[in-house]
Amino acid sequence: MAQHVTFAKMKVLPGKLDELTKLMDENPARLAQTGWQGSVVGKSKDDPETLWLCVTWDTSERYYANAGNPDQNAMYEKMRALLAADPEWFDCDVVQEQHA
């Protein structure tokens, strides 16, 4: 079971959703080596330029280590260029996880 989950609320620049999701798909193999377990991205039904991101990690320590990695920061900067503002981040400890 994952121990760490991060939620983010992001406002995408008009017309940049496809470019952003393509960028997010670029390197899952590298992320898996860092403790990343999975991601879900949802588009708000009320505002199609607002995205909600949910990312799970095996431990909080590995999540924060990845967040401080220069390669991850370079990826974030590419993503940030497609957003209208900085994301809102919410880091949490997992208390329950279920899958089909």
Image: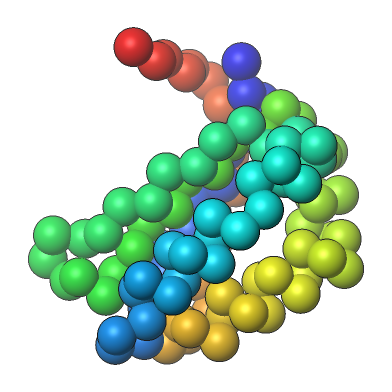
Above or below: residue 65 compared with residue 96? below
State which quarter of the image contains the C terminus. Answer: top left
- Pinpoint residue 27: horizontal percent, then vertical percent: 67, 53
**Residue 75 falls in image quadrant:** bottom right
96, 15: nearer the viewer: 15
Q: How many marks?
A: 0
Residue at 36 percent across and 71 percent down: it is 18
8, 71: nearer the viewer: 71
Residue at 54 percent across and 60 percent down: it is 24
Residue at 48 percent across and 58 percent down: it is 8
- Pinpoint residue 33: horizontal percent, then vertical percent: 81, 37
17, 80: nearer the viewer: 17
Residue at 77 percent across and 70 percent down: it is 73
**Residue 94 falls in image quadrant:** top right
- Pinpoint residue 68: horizontal percent, then vertical percent: 85, 61
Image side of residue 82 versus residue 74, left or right:
left
**Residue 3 falls in image quadrant:** top right
Q: Is residue 60 in view from this perspective?
A: no
Q: Is residue 70 in view from this perspective?
A: yes
